[in-house]
Amino acid sequence: MATILSVSGSPSVTSRTARLLRHVDDRLTAQGHEVIPLDVRTLPAEALLHADFGHPAIVEATVLVERADGIVIGTPVYKAAYSGLLKSLLDLLPQYALEGKTVLPLATGGSTAHVLAIDYALRPVLASMGPAHITPGWFTLDKDITVGHDGSLIVAPASAEALAQITDQFSLALAGRTTLLAATG
């Protein structure tokens, strides 16, 4: 089906955001997509801090974006905005790096007061990068994401159901787009 790049903008090793993304990745993989995870925190700090566009890790991340048919972008919300780490990566990508792509924005945070961060902070930046389509995003409260004793992710039922619907909408939009491209290509 499609190749999807799943980008976590969380700086934390034990990130709920990254765990939630891997949960979404599993659903997308089960639907037949190839999913490639990218945790921005694993990119060299010096490349991000010094805006080193030519750094091999940044070049590789750019190639992954170019190769993908769809992008899932996940971020924790800090002070009503997406993470600075994610901003650093987005700033280093070409202006129209998302051109022709289908994008699913996801966010996590501690309060429903931050639920609009997807639409008022993240979506405008993503839209400026030229995607063909940004599907409806989803904000998941931190309290709705827990880790079981065996390391498995547990998402509260109402959040899990909504997240599944949003993920399936993204998958359908992506499948429709890749089918259209194949027919016209």
Image: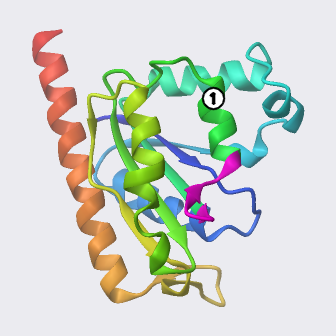
Q: Position of 47 compared to 39: left or right?
A: right
Please name the amino acid that badge 1 sits on: Asp
Q: Is residue 138 magenta?
A: no
Judge whether residue 139 can be spotted in this image.
yes
Counting every numbered tag in the picture gives 1
Tell me if residue 4 can be seen.
no
Question: Which quadrant of the view contains residue 80?
Answer: bottom right
Q: Quadrant of residue 93?
A: top right
Task: Tell me which residue sits at (31%, 22%) in the image.
Answer: 100
Q: Is residue 82 magenta?
A: yes
Q: Quadrant of residue 157?
A: bottom left
The quadrant of the rendering that contains the N terminus is top left
Q: Is residue 113 above or below residue 130?
A: below
Return the x and y of residue 46 as percentages of the image width and height: 89, 32
Q: Nearer the viewer, residue 28 or 7?
A: 7
Task: Give whichever of 56, 141 is nearer the camera.
Answer: 141
Could you tell me which residue is drawn at 19 percent across and 42 percent down? 173
Label 1: which secondary element: helix
- In the rendered image, residue 161, in percent from the top left (x then y), is placed at 28, 77
Residue 84: x and y in percent read 69, 48
Given residues 35 and 57, the one toward you in this image is 57
Above or below for 166 versus 43: below
The residue drawn where x is 69% and y is 36% is: 88
> What residue is shown with label 1?
91
Residue most extreme to the right? 46
Q: Residue at x 65, y 34 (%)?
A: 89
The region drawn magenta spans 77-84
Instruction: Left or right? Give the position of 87 relative to 138.
Output: right
Q: Report x, y in % for residue 166.
A: 27, 61
